[in-house]
Image (cartoon, coloured by chain):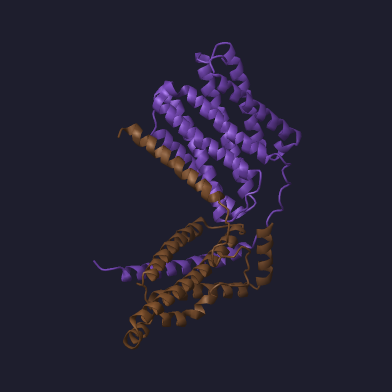
Chain colours: A brown, B purple
Amino acid sequence: MTLFGVYFVSIAATVLVVAILLFWSLRRRTKSRKGEVRSLEPVEVPGGHVIYLPQMGQALQKMDFEFLAARGTSRLMRQVKRERRQILLCYLEAVHGDFARLLRMARVIAVLSPEIAPAQEWERLRLSVWFALNYRMLRLRIGIGLASEPQLDGLSRSVGNLATQIEQAMTQLGERAAFAHELSSSLNS
Amino acid sequence: MDALGDSAKTLWLINVAIQAGLLTLLVWRKDYRRFPFFVAYLTVNLLQSAAFAILFTRPGYTSRIAWLFGWGSQGIVVAARACTVAEVCHHVLAPYRGIWAMGWRLLVVLGISVLVLAVAFGRHDLHAGIVTLDLGTELAIASVTAILFAFAKYYEVPLREPMRMLGIGLCLYSACYVLNDLLLQRYLAGYVEIWNLVGMIAFLGSLALWAWAFRVPVEAEATKPVLLDAEMYRNLIPEMNRRLFVLNEQLSQLWRVESPRP
């Protein structure tokens, strides 16, 4: 390929990227993503799904399957595995929703803040991309039956900690009600 | 003018008519107060068209003076369009002081980078060099507009009309222009007529979008959002990011531990 050929392809590719970006940006959300809220309710600090962690841990216990394999039929064991996997996926979806709400809250704070730190914004963008990738990998692994208890434990605890932290910070600021009102009215205006 | 084909002449007349109509409407409604650069852009464009009409009739479409004027005035038109993009950016982001302060710097750096890269790696002989400069500027305009929209989506900043349609029109027109210029550089003389025609069709499409956007009077400036105390950002965001970092680290680590062994 000639030098101009490379230039030609690079420019055409850039235009394609621009077009994709434009269409992605303009795409309206026909339905709100699972776990994501359309109107912000800051009082409802996310993280509630963490309380189901013990049940999720139970769903991953190998002992149950070993017991079923020994006492029941292999068909029954497969069915239970399948059902539990579905429950785990739902749980992961809910935790992801919590995470998305937290991120959204951070974005709203950034939008309504008179000063922001570009480094912090960049960091959050980078982290949210990584979270999305990791979440999809984990989802895939649960789907094919490779996830184990500690993975979910780590994920849920972090989300829970973050939620608690924000809740504490907001309480300390003593502006939760006013804040909720301001955010909602600003978003709706 | 006879050197232009019938279809090109018809398109040219339609473009001029719509532009004149839109400009009249904007001036009549006094929208130049809110959109001075867009009105200036339409005015410059119309003046260029009028000058072309004279030049193409007397010295002719293929004359050197027409060529020199064509590319010379194109620089002014593209600069006016770049200012219009800046105006759209300002309308969309400026009410949010924090992200505007970051956003405009980001967009300026991005625009200049795209322009410099496109020009640096393009052709530099006399004829193609001008096209390269034109292409680079148009690519920068398209990129900045697309990034502005992505930025607005990421931060959930509302994109109100007519800014939305104005931005879409500017981005799509510039993107078409880039592809058109690229093909012109590749095929040069053999592509000139098609280049003209494609350029006019793309412009007609954008004009239609802008006319649609301004079909109703522009709403008065929305009430400015009530901004939070800067302390809240300083207190919460670093901690939120730190937690997110820990979470990602955990996930990455777990992924490495659990990865299938070779």
In which quadrant of the rendered image does the C terminus of chain A lie? bottom right
User: x, y (%) of residue B60?
Assistant: 54, 13
User: x, y (%) of residue A179?
Assistant: 66, 67
In which quadrant of the rendered image does the N terminus of chain A lie? top left
Q: Residue furthest bottom?
A: A71
Is A113 positioned to the left or the right of A132 in the image?
Answer: right
Task: Using the image, determine if residue B257 lies above or below residue B103.
Answer: below
Is any atom of residue A175 visible in this view?
Answer: no
Quarter location, residue A59: bottom left
Is any atom of residue B29 visible in this view?
Answer: yes
Residue lying at 54% horizontally and 18% vertically, measured from the top left? B4
User: x, y (%) of residue A153?
Assistant: 42, 77
**Front position in the image: B242 or B41:** B41
Q: Residue furthest top?
A: B58
**Front position in the image: A122 or A101:** A101
Residue lying at 60% horizontally and 23% vertically, measured from the top left? B10
